[in-house]
Image: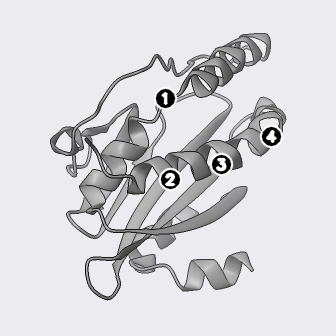
Amino acid sequence: MLKKKLSSLPYLIEIQPFLKGSNHVDVKTIDGNVSLREFIASMMSYAPWWLVLLYRIRTIVARVLGLEKQIELEGPFQISPEDISFTPGGNAHFFIVRKAKEDQYLISETPEDKHLSAYLAISVENLDGNLNRFHVTTIVFYKHWTGPVYFNLIRPFHHLVVRQMMRAGISQRK
């Protein structure tokens, strides 16, 4: 099933180098009538109370495992579409842009850490009318024995969080 999802990704050729040797890949898809920039900004702005709480619990788990960096999430906050960089080395919230093309895809990486590295690839496929299909790909590489331990602890929440972030991504901003 994953191979089929990967083979249907738009801009797969650009994402392909980031997949080599990965330990975990998942692809989630959602349709909406927003632009790629709007989708990413709304997705990254998603910080309901329960997600902030999960990030606080995650910080405790990360400290117990001796992980170097913890991503702090405090809400609420709003990221505007103009705040999303499509320049390699720029920022997309706490992610670092590695490769991007306006209105097509953005591939970003989590900050450097000893346990794992992860990429978030977001691509858009234009459908009929104003409708777009967004593909959100998570790519994880374990770097230390704590990588699979940590990721398997957060994996169930990862799927929930990404799905909810995607729903927020397609919602119309006020």
In the image, 137: left or right of 93? right
Specify whether residue 118 is in view.
Answer: yes
In the image, 36: left or right of 112? left
Q: Residue at x 36, y 44 (%)?
A: 42
The residue labelled by disc 1 is 47
The local secondary structure at tag 2 comes to helix
Toward the front, the furthest residue is 174
Q: Amino acid at mark 3?
A: Phe
How far apart are the alpha carbons under marks 4 and 1? 25 Å
> Along the polypeptide, which appears first: circle 3 or circle 1?
1
**Residue 148: assigned label:** 4
How far apart are the alpha carbons under marks 2 and 4? 27 Å
Q: In front here: 55 or 62?
A: 55
In the image, 45: left or right of 17? left
The residue labelled by disc 3 is 141
On the rendered image, what quadrant is the C terminus found in? Answer: top left
The residue labelled by disc 2 is 167
> Along the polypeptide, which appears first: circle 4 or circle 1?
1
